[in-house]
Image (cartoon, coloured by chain):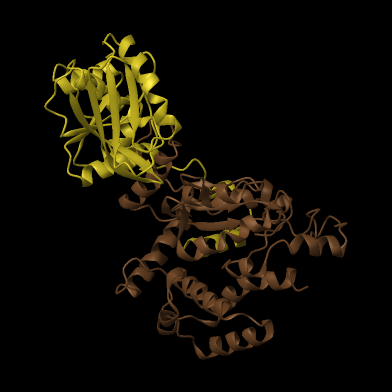
Chain colours: A brown, B yellow
């Protein structure tokens, strides 16, 4: 999420857990076990039923994030197991700290090797990160002026490496909210409604991937993508021109298809239409506009 | 006399079974020896245990005491061995006799006055206890609810060394901590936040739904 200060990036991230499907009993146990091992369970509470939300400060060390110590203890990514890890002010994080995230994000676990043996901690999580578009925060804001020099902006953005950016499936811009909407008495979409949509989309995925237990659109292998993400003719040509124009990587191509499949599921549509695909491509274009160089 | 007890040690987030052996033999020079790759927190435990015994009204054996934590090649770094070692002292010196030793494992840290303090990783230990097919686990009272989540074993909460002794000797009946999955879900299954608090940003919410699905 990229947006000016105070537009609600943190609020959006904090509430992500509320629209995810309920945890299965084994998942609850797994998450609780990690909290129990570090002695962080709230007093008298027997079980963690809700999905954890962790937002470590940007001064965190590598060991603090992925776990470490001579007798290894779990880090923030394991504490966020089955939940959400929120990295606010992403460019402020130490670059090396962010790079160690790459492998756990792909494998959903982290293995720490020490002289007396190696330990594997589970770390299956959703990574959400937020940042400002430039050091002062007002680049692209319609009302306020940004007074950062191009060099400052470039330096700020270059703290996030391409490979890490490539692993983030959905990039969005969070614009400032106009007063009219803020003062509006009607509340926006609530978690209940959003969650029902999510659960319905997930069950559609489960039906489709019934042969592969526990799979979701996000974890489809390239072969499954070819099988289940057939595009309509017009969508096909849209994707081809987008790929050519934006010079997307093979990974980005697969990710766009996964996201498009998910959007179609949210729409309860069997086929991936052109507008599903264009929404998915949209979620990938932001890095081009900001990191175009 | 030789005493053997079962306990668990935490490594990472997994618990491993550990056997505590305490042997007390008459000797001219009283000495306490602790072996079995004990790290600092375990090495210090003998001092805590000796005072906890005295302050709970038991006699501290003044003989040659050898404590062995097995498997000996696996490093142990937690205060959770206090309670089993303390019980081992009493068994080996003949102040406690019990038939429950093979059925119930024990974990807990001791305070100098004999109170049992909470430890880390009780849930993993309880899970391992269930996998090993034991009947139950004696845990610090503050950790009882955490451990009670595991089905198929009795979780015995103890508040002090004396209570643990009472339980093992059979003089004190302690009810296992009950647990109901439904109650826990009802009690803790709510989020304090909701997306209706976020005004505007409908397109961002849409993206968030896509991410969640």
**Residue B86 falls in image quadrant:** top left
Residue A48 left/right relative to A290: left
Above or below, comparing residue A37 to residue A225 in the picture = above
Residue at image position (34%, 29%) is B34
| Percent position of residue B65, x then y | 28, 22
Judge by depth and name the residue closer to the eye, B125 or A42: B125
Residue A21 left/right relative to A179: left
Judge by depth and name the residue closer to the eye, A80 or B24: B24
| Percent position of residue B1, x then y | 17, 23
Q: Residue furthest left?
A: B99
Judge by depth and name the residue closer to the eye, A185 or B144: B144
**Residue B112 falls in image quadrant:** top left
Q: Is residue B189 visible?
A: yes
Residue at image position (29%, 13%) is B60
| Percent position of residue B87, x then y | 25, 23
Q: Is residue B201 visible?
A: no
Judge by depth and name the residue closer to the eye, A121 or B39: B39
Residue at image position (30%, 44%) is B16
Above or below, comparing residue A170 to residue A194 in the picture = below
For the image, the number of numbered tags is 0
Residue A47 left/right relative to A55: left
Q: Residue furthest front?
A: B28
| Percent position of residue A15, x then y | 53, 49
């Amino acid at each position: 999420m990229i947006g000016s200060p105070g537009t609600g990036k943190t609020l959006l991230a904090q509430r992500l857990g509320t629209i995810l499907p309920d945890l299965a009993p084994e998942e609850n146990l797994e998450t609780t076990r990690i909290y129990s091992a570090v002695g962080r369970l709230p007093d008298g509470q027997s079980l963690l039923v809700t999905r954890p939300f962790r937002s470590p400060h940007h001064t965190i060390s590598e060991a603090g994030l992925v776990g470490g110590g001579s007798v290894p203890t779990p880090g923030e990514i394991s504490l966020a197991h089955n939940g959400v890890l929120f990295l606010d002010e992403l460019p402020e994080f130490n670059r090396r700290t962010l790079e160690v995230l790459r492998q756990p994000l792909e494998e959903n676990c982290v293995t720490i090797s020490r002289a007396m043996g190696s330990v594997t901690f589970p770390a299956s999580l959703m990574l959400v990160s937020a940042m400002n578009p430039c050091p002062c925060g007002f680049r692209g804001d319609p009302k306020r002026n940004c007074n950062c020099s191009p060099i400052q902006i470039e330096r700020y953005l270059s703290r996030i490496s391409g490979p890490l950016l490539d692993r983030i499936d959905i990039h969005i811009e969070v614009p400032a909210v106009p007063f009219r909407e803020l003062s509006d008495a009607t509340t926006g979409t609530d978690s209940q409604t959003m969650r029902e949509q999510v659960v319905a989309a997930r069950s559609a995925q489960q039906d489709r991937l019934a042969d592969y237990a526990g799979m979701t659109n996000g974890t489809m292998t390239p072969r499954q993508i070819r099988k289940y993400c057939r595009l309509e003719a017009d969508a096909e040509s849209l994707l081809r021109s987008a790929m050519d124009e934006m010079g997307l990587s093979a990974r980005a191509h697969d990710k766009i298809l996964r996201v498009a499949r998910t959007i179609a599921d949210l729409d309860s549509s069997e086929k991936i239409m052109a507008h599903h695909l264009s929404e998915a491509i949209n979620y990938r274009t932001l890095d081009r506009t900001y990191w175009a160089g | 006399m030789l005493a053997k007890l079962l306990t668990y040690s935490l490594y990472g987030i997994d618990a491993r079974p550990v056997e505590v052996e305490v042997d007390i033999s008459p000797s001219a020079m009283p000495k306490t020896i602790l072996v079995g790759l004990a790290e600092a927190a375990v090495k210090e435990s003998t001092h805590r245990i000796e005072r906890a015994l005295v302050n709970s009204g038991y006699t501290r054996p003044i003989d040659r005491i050898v404590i062995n934590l097995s498997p000996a090649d696996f490093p142990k770094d937690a205060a959770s061995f206090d309670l089993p070692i303390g019980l081992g002292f009493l068994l080996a010196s003949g102040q406690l006799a019990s038939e429950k030793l093979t059925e119930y494992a024990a974990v807990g840290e001791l305070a100098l006055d004999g109170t049992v303090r909470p430890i880390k990783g009780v849930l993993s230990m309880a899970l391992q206890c269930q996998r090993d097919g034991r009947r139950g686990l004696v845990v610090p009272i503050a950790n009882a609810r955490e451990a009670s989540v595991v089905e198929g074993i009795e979780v015995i909460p103890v508040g002090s060394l004396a209570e643990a002794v009472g339980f093992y000797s059979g003089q004190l009946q302690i009810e296992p901590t009950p647990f109901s999955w439904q109650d826990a879900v009802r009690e803790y299954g709510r989020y304090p936040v909701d997306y209706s608090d976020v005004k505007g940003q409908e397109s961002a919410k849409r993206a968030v739904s896509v991410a969640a699905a």
